[in-house]
Image (cartoon, grey):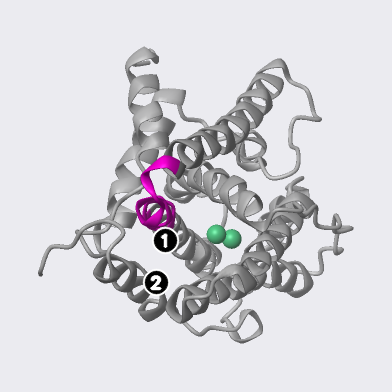
C-alpha cells in the first residue's frame, strides 16, 4: 500500500472509503431474534439502562446528522450521512429488541443539540471513543459470565463493530480537518479538541465516582457506559476489565487499513490506569 500524508486527498479517500465500504445493510426487524428462556428474559427486563441507551443512540444520530450540511466534500458528506444512519439504526435495534421481548418501551429523552454542529460532533466523537473502548471489553466479559444468551449477544455484535468504525473515522476526520487548516488556526482546533475531550472524560469520571459511592443517579446524558458496567454487576476485577478492554480495542481495530490513525487517548489512559490497579 502506498503511504499518504495526514490531511492529503489520499488520506481522506482512505478513511472515507474504509468507512463506506465496510457499511453493512442490515435491518433490525429482519434479524434472527432468538427465543429466550424466562430467566434470560427477566434479566433483560431488569436492566436499568434501556432508556439511556436508546436516548443516547438517538441523540448521537441527530448530532451526526447535524454535521452533514457542513460537509461540502461529497465523499466526507456520504460517510458522515452513513454514520448518522447507523446511529439511528442502533437506537432502532434496541427498540426492536424491547418490542420483540415484550419489554415496555421507555420514555425517550428529547435530543440535546449544540448550536454549533462541529462542536457537537467533537463532543460526541470523544464520548464515543471512551464508551466504545469499554463496550469492546464488556461484551466478551458479559459473554464469559454467561449474563445473556450467546445468540442474543451475537445479534448485538453489529453495534459494537460499527462503533469501532465510527471511532476510527472520527480519529481520522479530526486529524484531517486540522491538517487542512492554515497553521495559525491549528492551536485553536487543538484547544477545542482538548476541551471536548476533557468535558467527556470529566463527565465519565463523575459517573464512575458516583457509581463507586453507590449513587443510583450516576448515569447521565451520554456517559452511560460506566452505568452499564455497574448494572451488569460483572464479577471481574477492575484490572481484568481494563486489560480486556485494551486487548479487545486492538483486536476490533486491527482489520482496518493500517495507514489510518487509531484513537490513542483512551487506550493510553487505560494503560496508565492498568499500572495503578492491583493485580488481584
Ligand atoms: Fe451507536
Ligand atoms: Fe457510533
The residue positioned 43% from the left and 52% from the top of the image is: 174
Residue 45 quadrant: bottom right
Asked whether residue 180 is drawn in magenta, I would say yes
- Range of magenta residues: 172-184
Percent coordinates x, y for residue 119 in the rendering: 63, 49
Dominant secondary structure of the magenta stretch?
A: helix
Res 177 seen here: yes
Mark 1 Cα-neighbour bin, 10 Å: few <14, some 14–19, many ≥20? many
Helix, strand or loop status at disc 2:
helix
Instruction: Depth check: give the residue in front, 54 or 204.
Output: 204
Residue behind mark 1: 169
Which tag, 1 or 2, sits closer to the chain's start?
A: 2
The residue positioned 66% from the left and 40% from the top of the image is: 223
Residue behind mark 2: 19
Relative to residue 54, is residue 137 depicted above or below? above
Q: Are marks 1 and 2 in contact (CB under 8 Å)?
A: yes
The residue positioned 78% from the left and 73% from the top of the image is: 99
Amino acid at each position: 500500500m502506498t503511504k499518504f500524508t495526514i490531511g492529503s486527498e489520499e488520506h481522506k479517500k482512505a478513511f472515507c472509503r474504509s468507512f463506506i465500504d465496510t457499511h453493512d445493510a442490515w435491518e433490525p426487524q429482519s434479524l434472527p431474534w432468538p427465543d429466550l428462556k424466562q430467566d434470560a428474559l427477566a434479566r433483560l427486563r431488569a436492566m436499568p439502562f434501556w432508556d439511556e441507551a436508546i436516548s443516547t443512540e438517538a441523540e448521537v444520530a441527530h448530532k451526526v446528522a447535524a454535521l452533514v450540511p457542513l460537509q461540502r466534500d461529497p465523499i466526507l458528506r456520504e460517510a458522515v450521512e452513513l454514520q448518522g444512519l447507523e446511529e439511528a439504526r442502533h437506537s432502532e435495534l434496541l427498540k426492536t429488541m424491547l418490542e420483540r421481548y415484550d419489554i415496555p418501551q421507555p420514555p425517550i429523552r428529547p435530543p440535546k443539540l449544540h448550536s454549533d454542529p462541529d462542536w457537537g460532533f467533537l463532543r460526541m466523537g470523544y464520548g464515543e471513543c471512551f464508551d466504545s473502548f469499554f463496550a469492546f471489553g464488556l461484551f466478551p466479559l458479559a459473554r464469559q459470565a454467561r449474563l445473556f444468551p450467546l445468540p442474543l449477544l451475537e445479534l448485538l455484535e453489529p453495534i459494537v463493530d460499527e462503533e469501532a468504525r465510527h471511532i476510527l473515522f472520527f480519529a481520522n476526520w479530526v486529524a484531517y480537518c486540522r491538517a487542512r487548516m492554515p497553521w495559525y488556526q491549528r492551536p485553536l482546533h487543538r484547544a477545542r479538541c482538548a476541551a471536548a475531550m476533557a468535558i467527556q472524560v470529566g463527565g465519565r469520571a463523575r459517573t464512575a465516582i458516583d457509581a463507586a459511592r453507590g449513587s443510583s443517579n450516576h448515569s447521565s446524558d451520554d456517559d452511560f457506559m460506566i452505568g452499564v458496567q455497574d448494572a451488569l454487576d460483572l464479577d471481574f476485577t477492575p484490572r481484568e476489565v481494563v486489560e480486556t478492554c485494551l486487548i479487545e480495542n486492538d483486536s476490533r481495530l486491527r482489520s482496518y487499513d493500517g495507514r489510518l490513525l487509531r484513537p490513542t487517548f483512551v487506550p493510553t489512559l487505560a494503560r496508565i490506569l492498568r499500572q495503578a490497579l492491583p493485580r488481584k
